[in-house]
Amino acid sequence: MKRFIYPLFAMLLVLAARIDVLPAHAQTPDPQEIVDACLRAHGGERFTTSVVDFDFRGRHFTVSHRGGLFAYTRTYTDSTGMVAETLHNDGCFRELNGTRIELADNTRRAVASVINSVVYFALLPHKLNDPAVRKRYLGESIIAVEPYRKVEVTFVEEGGGEDHRDVFIYWIHKQRNTMDYLAYTYHVNGGGTRFREAFNTRVVEGIRVADYHNYRASSEEIPLEAYEGLFQSGKLIKVSDVNMENVRVRLTEMPQHGKGE
């Protein structure tokens, strides 16, 4: 029996050493750290000290952030004349040919919702650290031979807006920290699910922007978790391209050194 003691003792030492090492490597990644790294890769503090102009589906958007203050304006021309609709910290209003006009409450809410939705998607991942956001790490995956970490985002009702029931999954590149894919549920207009693939990515004055191929599944009942596999097997149906055109960025002040890079 004695000749088995030393090999057994050696094996136990090896196992003990592995137990000491594994926790450092096996810890679940912090989704907050993943999102923070993603924000830095996409522009960091430039988001909060900039004015971004772009055209989207025939309408012009001007998005201004300065610290905690924001103003999002959508302008377009229709049969009544030049329309400018602005969502800002204190509410939402509309101007027609330079004159402010009264809006019914339901119209005001609808205008604010549409403007906020366009800006949310256009400037992703900028909004992922809003106070109403809750993050959960979902694991790693490989898409197009590239490594990604998945983060789920949900919202608390207070401060989460009318879309607080929506659920998002973001695929963030493990090395580049870029957000290249996302899937989400939505509840307006009957609700449904979508999957987006970033393309035509470019950097404008330090802020990374992208257009998206927009897909759906054969059924709106398919859960978000299934979209990755459906995309990789070519089973999603392309709905549209989501394009930001004529993007311009003006920094209102330079980010603090080291924080916005």
Image (cartoon, grey):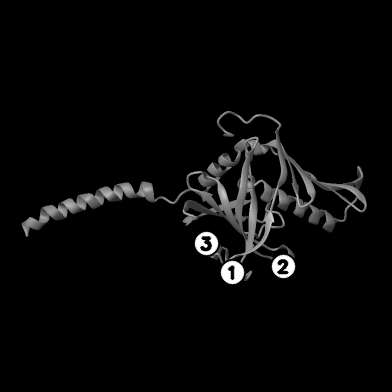
- Give the Cα distance between marks 3 and 1: 15 Å
- The label shown at residue 19 is none
- The label shown at residue 232 is 3
Residue type at mark 1 is Ile
Residue plotted at (72% across, 57% down)? 162
Q: Secondary structure at mark 3?
A: helix
Which residue is denoted by mark 2 in the rendering? 190
The residue at the far left in this view is 2
Q: Select label 3 or label 1 by which is in front.
A: 3
Chain-order first, disc 2 or disc 3: 2
Q: Say left or right for 194 vs 23.
A: right
Which residue is denoted by mark 1 in the rendering? 222
- Give the Cα distance between marks 1 and 2: 15 Å
Q: Residues within 10 Å of mark 1 (few under 14, many from 20)?
A: few
Q: Position of residue 124 (x, y in %)?
A: 63, 47
Residue plotted at (55% across, 31% down)? 258
- Give the Cα distance between marks 2 and 3: 27 Å
Residue type at mark 3 is Gln
